Image: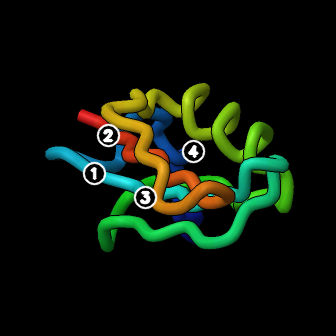
Amino acid sequence: MRRIRQTAPMIGQAWTGRHVILLHCTSDNQLLHLYKSYHAPIEPPRDNCAETLSQLLSIGYRIQAITALSPNHLQYFLVLE
């Protein structure tokens, strides 16, 4: 009987290039929307905006800009290179 040897998946970056995320939050820390480039690596977003930001920063994203879209609506622009 012939056995096929399977190898364990390799750990590493599965993406190349630059990826962007737009994170829309309320001023009281609630996540409204998350928009991302097609192949951007991401973990499931949380209802808590600070927790979602924490996850994205731990993956390697960097905050490029923070914009107030209205008095109660903030947009975070994050980039992963």
- Percent across and percent down for residue 47 are 84, 61
Q: Tag 2: residue type?
A: Val
State the quadrant of the N terminus.
bottom right
Q: Residue furthest front?
A: 71
- Percent across and percent down for residue 64 are 32, 32
Residue of label 1? 19
Query: Foreground: 25 or 79?
Result: 25
Q: Residue at x 52, y 47 (%)?
A: 9
Residue of label 2? 79
Q: CA distance from mark 1 to mark 2?
A: 6 Å
Q: Tag 3: residue type?
A: Leu
Q: Secondary structure at mark 4?
A: loop
Q: Residue at x 45, y 70 (%)?
A: 35
Q: CA distance from mark 3 to mark 4?
A: 34 Å
Query: Foreground: 40 or 69?
Result: 69
Q: Tag 4: residue type?
A: Ala
Q: CA distance from mark 3 to mark 1?
A: 10 Å
